[in-house]
Image (cartoon, rainbow, N blue to C red):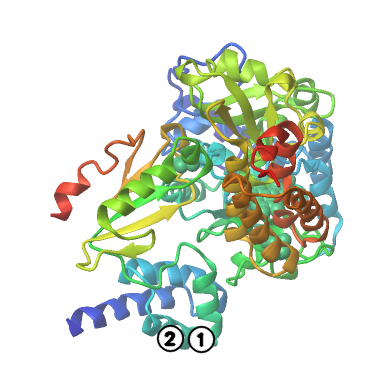
């Protein structure tokens, strides 16, 4: 386990080096770190602060300002419900409620066994297919209210 | 390497092929910005060039002075497609007049309005068109560095643009001393990270600089004090996508399309309760009725039309009796909405307008950057007030408070987000007041 963590820090270090340790690449670095670790843990943020010679408060401030950055790990599977205008008009809030009820967790939470996270998004630019959800990075359009969960049910079991 | 306009022509000829134009384009549409979408392979610079791509850039480098380029854009009457509608030629002119060693061109690909995907289509389907427009802007304003700020939800756009930059650089169309003209231009992509406010110009600049996307007071404008304090042109994706056509066909040609004050075409994303969803491009001045019923096929499931929302969280809802309104900057404004970036959401009569107003207010409340109090606190309080109307336990006093607070937030917020956040409420009060009154309990 430790080894793989070290490897991930090595990957991150490499990408910071490639960006020239420039302070203004902070957002790029956070993107890379989230891609490598799946989320931005406190230790990762501290590491980044040291490497870019930035105060930790600044790194934390930027990471929490942007919706895209996650400070908690995601579940093994995830459903992202689009709550953009086009999807909202087509009932995406009801779809979210159905899914929340089904798994007993709220948006931005993960089931206690770590199997599933429910997330929300502002728009994927696939609004012609509204309502849209994304199951494990796979986009699904024209989701029906009756059965919004599609094949993800199978995977989670 | 392509080093002259003749070589570009030869290259185009060599790659010529039969491009079939997609079927199903409505006769009321006119394609300028979208002319290559679905026609060329966005991964192929050869196809872009074969369709006349980069010809405008080479023409500019070969035959035109920077001020002639700006003049042509001014003649065209092109106004910014990001929402505000500021004349593009004037914006470029003010940057061109500032003396500075370093200037920047920024393309705003943040497309924050949820329900809109015009810019996504252009970045993914015709990335070179954006690069060509930016490079021409660079030449006109004496800037040699460009950034494209793309929202993180659009990984495909990033991929297409990255490939396009590589291809253009390889052929010498981007980079040092383009076509032996002495002009150099390079482009980098910067990723957003899911903050609506970062679409605002000064916040976007702060985000490229690596910080939190907080807007700042203007002036100083970006034309004087932009990215890293240097003079900066910032335009929307669709704005840049119009430039090559304006140079190719002339500003007068463009000016002839559309209406007196709003020239050219506009791309709209049609969504909501409408039969044909998707992207359309129409001359400015087309009426809402033509867009919804002729091109869009009318309301889906044979329900009745109630309103059309334009301009996203900064816009408003337009009711049925205004359907013959011509779509241009001024008309939409006079109806209490705005052009916005091009999202059009059709709403049928099963929807409650107070809930829709609340949806947008809640959006603004969670996207408020928190820098100034009227927006940070006001949008939250407004959301709570709207909840009372939805729960049907508001009072007459709440209604007065609602209207008053809208005015306060509008007039005292620092940036466009707060200044326009009350618009969806105000426009629904204007046209659907009875739905608010229905939320007031008897006393
Ligand atoms: C809160 C807010 C969000 C905005 N979001 C965008 C956006 O996503 N895309 C965009 O092009 N312009 C957006 N704008 C407008 C920009 O500030 C700017 O006016 C525009 O990009 C300038 O380009 P144009 O002149 O070509 O329209 C936004 C403005 C505000 C106040
Ligand atoms: S109006 Fe809202 S988004 Fe704009 S600066 Fe103030 S708090 Fe931030
Ligand atoms: S609003 Fe859901 S994909 Fe655009």
Residue sitting at x 44%, y 17%: B20
- Horizontal arrangement in the rendering, residue B127 relative to residue B372 (left or right): left
Query: Does the residue tagged 2 have its C-beta within 8 Å of any atom of ligand 2?
Result: no
Q: Contact (CB < 8 A) between labels 2 and 1? A: yes
- How many neighbours does mark 1 have within 10 angstroms: few (below 14), some (14-19), or many (20 or more)? some
- The residue that mark 1 highlights is A56
Quarter of the view holding residue A69: bottom left
Instruction: Indicate the position of residue A155 as horizontal and vertical percent values.
Output: 16, 51
SS assignment at label 2: helix
- Horizontal arrangement in the rendering, residue A26 relative to residue B85 (left or right): left
The disc placed on residue A46 is: 2
Instruction: Indicate the position of residue A112 as horizontal and vertical percent values.
Output: 23, 68
- Horizontal arrangement in the rendering, residue A135 relative to residue B339 (left or right): left
Please report whichever mark, 2 or 1, sits nearer to the chain's N-terminal start: 2
- How many neighbours does mark 2 have within 10 angstroms: few (below 14), some (14-19), or many (20 or more)? some
SS assignment at label 1: helix
Residue sitting at x 19%, y 85%: A2
Instruction: Indicate the position of residue B78 as horizontal and vertical percent values.
Output: 76, 35
Up/down of B357 relative to A49, above or below = above
Chain letter for the residue marked with disc 2 in the picture: A
Q: Is residue A67 visible?
A: yes
Q: Is residue B34 visible?
A: no
Instruction: Say which of B11 and B160 sits in front.
Output: B160
């Amino acid at each position: 386990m430790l080894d793989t963590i070290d490897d991930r820090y090595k990957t991150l270090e490499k990408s910071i080096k490639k960006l020239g340790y420039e302070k203004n690449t902070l957002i790029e670095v956070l993107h890379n770190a989230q891609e490598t670790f799946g989320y931005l843990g406190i230790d990762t943020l501290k590491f980044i602060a040291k490497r870019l010679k930035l105060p930790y408060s600044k790194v934390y401030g930027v990471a929490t300002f942007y919706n895209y950055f996650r400070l908690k790990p995601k579940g093994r599977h995830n459903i992202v419900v689009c709550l953009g205008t086009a999807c909202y008009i087509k009932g995406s809030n009801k779809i979210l409620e159905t899914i929340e009820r089904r798994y007993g967790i709220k948006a931005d939470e993960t089931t206690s066994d770590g199997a599933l996270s429910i997330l929300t998004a502002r728009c994927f630019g696939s609004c012609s297919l509204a309502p849209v959800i994304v199951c494990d990075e796979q986009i699904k359009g024209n989701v029906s209210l009756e059965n919004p969960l599609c094949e993800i049910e199978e995977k989670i079991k | 390497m392509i080093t002259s306009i003749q070589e570009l022509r030869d290259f185009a000829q060599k790659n010529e092929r039969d491009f079939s134009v997609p079927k199903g384009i409505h006769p009321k549409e006119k394609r300028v910005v979208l002319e290559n979408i679905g026609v060329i392979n966005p991964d192929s610079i050869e196809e872009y060039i074969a369709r006349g791509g980069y010809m405008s850039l080479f023409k500019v480098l070969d035959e035109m002075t920077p001020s002639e380029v700006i003049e042509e854009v001014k003649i065209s009457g092109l106004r910014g497609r990001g929402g505000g509608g500021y004349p593009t030629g004037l914006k470029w002119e003010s940057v061109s007049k500032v003396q500075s060693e370093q200037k920047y061109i920024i393309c705003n690909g943040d497309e924050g309005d949820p329900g809109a995907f015009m810019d996504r289509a252009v970045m993914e389907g015709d990335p070179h068109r954006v690069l060509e427009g930016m490079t021409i802007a660079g030449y006109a304003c004496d800037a040699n560095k460009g950034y494209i700020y793309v929202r993180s939800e659009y990984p495909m756009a990033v991929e297409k643009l990255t490939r396009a930059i590589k291809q253009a650089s390889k052929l010498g169309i981007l980079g040092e001393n383009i076509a032996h003209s002495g002009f150099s231009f390079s482009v980098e992509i910067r990723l957003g990270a899911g903050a609506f406010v970062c679409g605002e110009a000064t916040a976007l600049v702060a985000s490229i600089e690596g910080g939190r996307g907080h807007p700042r007071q203007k002036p100083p404008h970006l034309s004087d004090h932009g990215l890293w304090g240097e003079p900066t042109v910032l335009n929307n994706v669709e704005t840049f996508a119009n430039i090559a056509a304006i140079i190719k066909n002339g500003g007068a040609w463009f000016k002839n399309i559309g209406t007196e004050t709003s020239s050219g075409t506009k791309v709209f994303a049609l969504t909501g309760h409408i039969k044909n969803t998707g992207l359309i491009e129409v001359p400015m001045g087309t009426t809402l009725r033509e867009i919804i019923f002729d091109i869009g096929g009318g309301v889906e499931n044979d329900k009745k039309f109630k309103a059309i929302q334009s301009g996203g969280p900064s816009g408003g809802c337009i009711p049925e009796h205004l359907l013959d309104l011509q779509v241009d900057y001024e008309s939409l404004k006079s109806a209490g909405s705005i052009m916005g970036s091009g999202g059009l959401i059709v709403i049928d009569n099963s929807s409650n307008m107070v809930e829709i107003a609340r949806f947008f207010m809640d959006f603004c409340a969670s996207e408020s950057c928190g820098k100034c109090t009227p927006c940070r606190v006001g949008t939250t309080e407004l959301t709570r007030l709207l909840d009372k109307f939805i729960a049907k336990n508001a009072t007459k006093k709440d209604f007065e408070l609602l209207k008053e607070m809208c005015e306060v937030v509008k007039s005292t917020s620092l940036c466009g987000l707060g200044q326009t956040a009350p618009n969806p409420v105000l426009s629904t009060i204007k046209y659907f007041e009875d739905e608010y009154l229905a939320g007031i309990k008897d006393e």
